[in-house]
Amino acid sequence: MGVLTPIFFYNSFMKKILFLFFLLNTVAFAFENKYDFGRGFNINNNIWIGGYLTFSYKNRDDKGSLKFEDIALLSRISFGNISLFSEIEAKNIYISSFNSHKRTGNNKYIPKIEKSRNWHFDFEIERLFIEYNYNKYLNFKVGRFLTPLGIWNKIHIDALKWTVSDPLVSTNFFPMFTTGIDLYGFFPLGRNIKYNIFVQRNENINPSYNNLKVDKLTGFQIEKIVNINQRYGFNGGIFDEDISYERYTFLGIFGKTKIKKLYFSSEIFYAFEKNKGNVKHKEHGKITYYIQSAYRVFPSHYVVFRKDGLYDSSDDKTIDIWTVCWNYRPRFNVSFKVEYQIFEKYPDCFRLSFALLF
């Protein structure tokens, strides 16, 4: 049994109760309290309710899909220094997909359009944690939260992201979510130097929503915050991946800055991998990175370039991706994106998305 088992439990009945609770709160206070588009409802400074949704289109190698990607309800209920945060989300609500070619027995393609449409509407727990804010230097959260590493992984809502796709750093290297404890704050003697120390020693809340299946994770991050557009730092940690039975020990550096109309960011991670089982497995390393620039061409219009790379010495696997994206953001909480990705060893990919934070 994990250390959080007495505090958190998870089943379908709990999901429906939580969703109903936050829906009723929204309806009850909608006409009695101030609503700020993009920032949600603020009810007596004790309850905050908001949400977001995303629609997307993807086409790759004559295969395409149109998705109602997700819709989520966010809430924070505060009791003095203690608050409860939740994110209840439904993913892949509607998917319409097609395949315009079909492979024959002699390995040739013949024109044929195959279509499918699917509806799926089931709310799940994306994030759920209790947070205690003691002072500027010492705070903690307990529950399921975004793994506090680097830059990209902490930007969870699609409307606030630069591109449609996520870089390999966020999707292929470390778990996006941690179910455990995060201790964080600023160093008393440092100048805006923030620390995070997080630990997981239990099963995940809703493991299907995580990119890696992890029950044991320990990590840290040290970050120098200059301003909202400039920060840099380093991090590290160790975790056990349950499916591959691998232990990863990793280190990373990251940074972002703004020079007039140019926004620049980068993250680099290196991991040493070791098999924990009886199978003889060559110890090996893996490195991944991205370098990204976003330039404001016109008011509310940005062009984004990103280079992703990944190398795994276990099988000499290499992935190289070039991404170019046009992001139209009339408001901070509304984003229309058109993206094209060039893969060195795989078919290219075209994506569209509309995302809204409400």
Image (cartoon, helix red, strand yellow):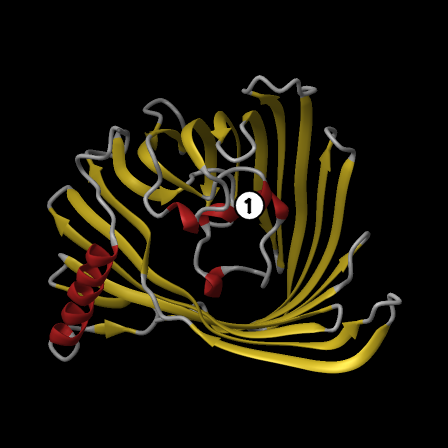
Residue identifier under label 1? 170
Residue 78, image x, y percentages: 15, 50
Residue 29, image x, y percentages: 13, 73
Q: Residue at x 44, y 27 (%)?
A: 219
Left or right of residue 297: residue 5? left
Left or right of residue 41: residue 339? right
| Local SS, label 1 | helix
Q: Is residue 152 visible?
A: yes
Left or right of residue 337: residue 320? right
Q: Nearer the viewer, residue 289 or 172?
A: 172
Q: Is residue 65 above or below residue 289?
A: below
- The answer to which quarter of the image holds residue 142 is top left
Q: Residue at x 75, y 68 (%)?
A: 61
Q: Residues within 10 Å of mark 1 (few under 14, many from 20)?
A: many
Q: Residue at x 84, y 73 (%)?
A: 109
Amino acid type, mark 1: Ser
Q: Nearer the viewer, residue 225 or 71?
A: 71
Residue 249, image x, y percentages: 55, 23
Q: Nearer the viewer, residue 64 or 255?
A: 64
How many marks on residues?
1
- The answer to which quarter of the image holds residue 225 is top left
Quadrant where the C terminus sits is bottom left
Quadrant where the N terminus sits is top left
Q: Nearer the viewer, residue 241 or 325?
A: 241
Residue 110, image x, y percentages: 83, 78
Q: Residue at x 57, y 40 (%)?
A: 255
Q: Is residue 184 visible?
A: no
